[in-house]
Amino acid sequence: MAVRELRLSADLSSVREARRWGRDTALNRGAVELEAGVVELLISEVVSNAVTHASAGAGAVVVLRVIDEPCGLRVEVDDGGGGEPRRVFRPIGEGGLGLRLVADLASGWGVRRWHGGKTVWFRVDLGAQ
């Protein structure tokens, strides 16, 4: 099982790098354009959330991991912040539809808390493997 990891500074300028890296990683794993686009979109959402909740201060980092699984890819994003991602979705116009997208487009997702932060993960199934 291959694991690829990218460490990002905890600022919004890192989201673009995360999207590009995630898309390239998915394509290199054999994803078709549509699947790579889904991975790219969902990475954008969870990395944006992680940057928002990451521990403040110089040197704060967000860690993005892509893990090969038999049926696709598992993406994990670690932050050092204490914020909890919302599992209750607010009406349109009240902001934050990112996790709604993750819930709707990923084949699974969840949150794992650890001392000092959390990991938000999602899984994207890839076509016939």
Image (cartoon, rainbow, N blue to C red):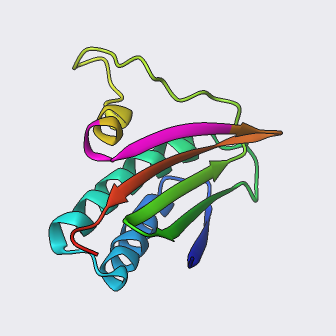
Q: In this view, does 16 lie above or below 123?
A: below
Residue 20 screen position, x and y as percent: 36, 72
Residue 80 screen position, x and y as percent: 72, 45
The residue nearer to you, when weighing 73 against 17, is 73
**View extreme (bottom): residue:** 28
**View extreme (right): residue:** 115
Q: Which residue is rendered at x = 47% and y = 60% of the image?
A: 74
Residue 88 screen position, x and y as percent: 41, 17
Number of numbered discs: 0
Report which quarter residue 111 is drawn in.
top right
Quadrant the N terminus occupies? bottom right
Quadrant the C terminus occupies? bottom left
Indicate yes or no whether the magenta region holds residue 12.
no
Q: Which residue is rendered at x = 29% and y = 81% of the image?
A: 30
- 28 relative to 53 in the view: left or right: left
Residue 113 screen position, x and y as percent: 70, 36
Q: Is residue 96 above or below residue 6?
A: above
- 82 relative to 96 in the view: left or right: right
Indicate yes or no whether the magenta region holds residue 111.
yes
Residue segment shown in magenta: 104-112
Q: Is residue 66 above or below residue 41?
A: below
Report which quarter residue 54 is drawn in.
top right
Q: Which residue is rendered at x = 51% and y = 67% of the image?
A: 66
